[in-house]
Image (cartoon, coloured by chain):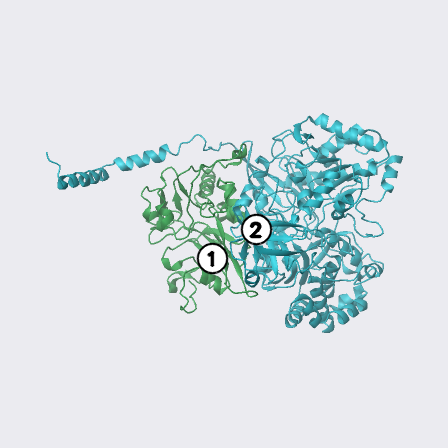
Amino acid sequence: MKIDRRSFLSFVIGGAAGTALSPLPWKLTDDIAIWSQNWPWTPVPQKGEVSYLNSTCTLCPGGCGILVRKVGERVVKLEGMEGHPVNDGGLCTLGLAGTQLLYGPTRVKTPLKKVNGAWRKISWNAAIAEIVEKLSDLRSKGLPHTVACISGSDRGTVPELFNRFLTVYGSPNFMRTSSIQDSYELTLFLTQGVRAMAGFDVANADFILSFGSGLIEGWESPVYMFRAKSTLRENGGRMDQIEPRLSKTAAKSDKWIAISPGTEGALALGLAHVIIKEKLYNKKFVDTYTSGFEAHKKLVIDGYPPDIVSKITGVDTATITALAKDFARARKPLAICGRGKGYIPGSLQEFLAIHTLNALVGNINQTGGIWAVPEPDYISWPEVEMDKIASNGLQQERVDGAGSKAYPYARYLLGRLPEVINSSQDSPIQVLFVTTANPMYAMPDTQAVAKAFEKIPFVVSFSSFLDETAVNADLILPNHVFLERYEDVPAAHGFPKPIIGLARPVIEPLFNTQHSGDVIIQIANELGGPIADAFPWDSYDACLEETLADKWDALVEDGYWSDEVFSAADWSTAFETDSAKFEFTNEDIESLPRYNPLKAKGDEAHYPLVLIPYDSMRLASGHIGSPPFLIKSVEDYILTANDVLVEVNPATANEYGLKDGKYAFLRTPKGNARVKVRVFDGIMPGLVAIPRGLGHTAFGRFLAGKGVHYNALIGPVEDPASGHDAAWGIRAKLSKT
Amino acid sequence: MEKENSKKFGMVIDLDKCTGCGSCMVACMAENNIPFREDETDKLLSVSWMHVYRLTNVKPFPDTEECYLPRPCQHCEGHHGHSPCVSVCPATATDYDMDTGIVSQIYTRCFGCRYCMAACPYHVRQFNWWDPLWPDGMEKSLNPNVSVRMRGVVEKCSFCIHRYQLAKDQAYMEGRREIEEDEYQTACTQACPAGAITFGDLNNPKHAVYQMVKPDKKNGGKPKNPKAFRLLERLGTNAKVYYLSSREWVRRAGDNYLKTEGQAKHA
């Protein structure tokens, strides 16, 4: 048979049609689908009995109640606890990704000791023996005060155990990581005479005036603030955001007022000027329950008329006047401050300026106002008995200078530590404990911090994760993660009522870790004498149960204890100042350097722009590094591959020839980095904005090496009034590569 | 065909409340065993059933405004269940369930042709270009109620249908035929810290979602709520995810309007 063109085509087309009509292709694709889907490396989650256990999240100071879903012995998911006073069912990104921290590859699985620059596994006994030897040695030399501790908190049993240990050992150098807590505590102390925590009744306010606070970016207790903001909205309340950049908080506000960064305090004083001049302040409160009003009045009337304030802040006078009037006329106005998530303490005078606005409208301790929430007082351990070495050690001045003549009001000044160490010949600290903190990442001027830590002969990290500080430590004594241990969570930051949460073990510890509370008790016992006597408990759990006493059962049952009927003290009894009134100003405040907007470091000729940081709920920027789910959720206009995008206004981009999406070189007096440019309308001209929480060197391949670390580009600026870090940015240069 | 007592699960997302925090995304990832890779910054390749978009009014400083828009699968009903994706799937791997109004995705049937991805106007569908791998030990956090997808298949938001099945099982065990509104909620709804997401049966007048977007019979069944709109309404996808916004430009951003078109109707 001759194969001509016609028969060939008939054969091919007929064959194709025949095959298509037969079940063959469908059967084959189905088989291929099934065959290609049965790979042994695709995991099949094991089934098991489902159970829910209540606990408290300790990943940030927010104090959210969580419900842990377990399948068999596996922790499968963390969810918000419904009915919990702080978060009522909601949970933030970090909490939701908590299982990835438990099972993730960045856990420290056993005690580690650094030998010639490499990690070597070591037994718990050997590790503790090593510390005990070092500590005994220092004590016998009469140098107990050269031992210090950096802790993420100073409240609750674990930080108190560390503090107690230092005290009875003979060191005054317990340091809490700094945040706006420091500034709010000082503000309440100076104006109201109370040692208290600031609580914000955001939900019941009807006008929130936020001076840069990231109310929906993780400020104070994040989920509580989210919920409160939604309630404010439902009630028809208003929220204005004063900030140089269109943050998410600004975007979700009724009004975004762009302001030159660092001048927020001046604006507050300008608003006070209008409120006082127009006699819009709360007369009942000001006349009866305050003192120092006349002096404050003189200060703002003479120094801060709208035209001058407008020049300082860049906000026009009409806006200033209207804002002041709206604020004062609202029924329940509330002014808040502390930029972004509030990790930088900020300028004390700025806090005072903004807090006095609250006093002018009379919302102190009122519904919808700012409350002085008493510090938790459930820990009442017997006084320690100190020997001579300890009392001598405690006589020494704190290494960070807190409480000294120069810094009389600050309780802790961790921010000063690197400079103090770097400027002395030998490190004034010989042994440093670091617990629930990651100072080598979280403190400004990473290079200086690294240099300082290098000088400390012996750094002990109690971290559960191989974070930046742990990597550079000499010994790691890994703590259980929060899902494996008991711990009290003594307060929820910014929450207006006293509340205690209980984190509890929902799973047996996965690795060879130990509770830091137990480790401290054990070290104390081995040191013996009065130190051992100060720790009469068999274990941390026993200590916790005994300490919480009558609250224990409720905590185990419900996961939290809260004082539901608490209301802040009445004006007649609220103030413990000399005048028993709210003091706009007094001798102590007068003795502080006056308010002056703090400038960004660096000279303008070399660095024409100003770099400011911003926060995001999708990037953890505290002592915990973002787990994979968080990094996955980061927007592609913040991070692309391993490059961070910095935001500049189109006008600024034009001026410096910068193109959207293109590389640029970012230089500051403290460091430099290659970044990509994002041209963004929501930022003031002349600024460059960079997100916090990137540029990790630790925490494994899902986080390390992504983006640039803001703290590597800036340095601290000491607040002349408090000694705390008040840097809100730094001068910078951005140029084409 | 739709039965008399059939349900129509839907979602109302209040964009005035949404803060763009991303909790819905992470809650979804944790609930639904979403895989993750080292670099997830190419969002066209990144698998995430819920995605929060950023909208802007495109005005220069200082009049710039932003809004955040969480986008799960819209579970389009189309006309009589002809959702864009269902209509094109050659493997019947995706289907519109008349009893619940949920668009399903059966991974073992999918052979990865990705027609559905092309057909979906909302980019809710994602393809598994890589084997899903969990670093050692991390597979312990996988949820047994949701199967792990393999390389080569398409996946998308299921409205956490496993939670519906669990709730129904529970109800039947207790001798009930119907479940309560709060017994079936998606992971994103539950996690949202701002309370921006409401989930329920759009056919049930007792449910919050029904009340929020109550249909106006005189206006072709469109919601009476002037703040309500759906994405790309004019394509006729008949989606079951409604959005609320008090801002006109946000509502307009929900569809492709010509510049010359007058003020948009509250679609």
Label 2 SS = strand
State the hue of chain B.
Answer: green
Residue placed most toward the observer, A707 or A528: A707
Q: Residue furthest left?
A: A1
Disc 1 element: strand
Residue shown at 70%/42% (left/top)?
Answer: A450
* Viewer-side residue, B210 vs B266: B266
Q: CA distance from mark 1 to mark 2?
A: 36 Å
Q: Quadrant of residue A277?
A: bottom right
Any idea which chain is the cyan one in this picture? A
Left or right, A195 with respect to B106, comes to right
Residue occupied by mark 2 = A675
| Vertical relation: A647 (above or below) B248 | above
Q: Chain of mark 1?
A: B
Which amino acid, by three-letter code, is at mark 1? Tyr
- What chain is tagged by disc 2? A
Q: Residues within 10 Å of mark 1 (few under 14, many from 20)?
A: many
Locate residue A643, reporting x and y percent. 55, 48
The answer to whether marks 1 and 2 sit on the same chain is: no
Q: Position of residue A257 (x, y in %)?
A: 62, 64
Residue A216 visible? The answer is no
Q: Residues within 10 Å of mark 2 (few under 14, many from 20)?
A: many
Nearest to the eye among marks 1 and 2: give it.
2
Q: Position of residue A269 (x, y in %)?
A: 72, 66
Q: Which mark is residue A261?
A: none
* Residue A336, image quadrant: bottom right
Which residue, given by chain and number where applicable, does mark 1 sit on?
A: B243
Q: Quadrant of residue B220?
A: bottom left
Q: What's the amino acid at mark 2?
A: Val
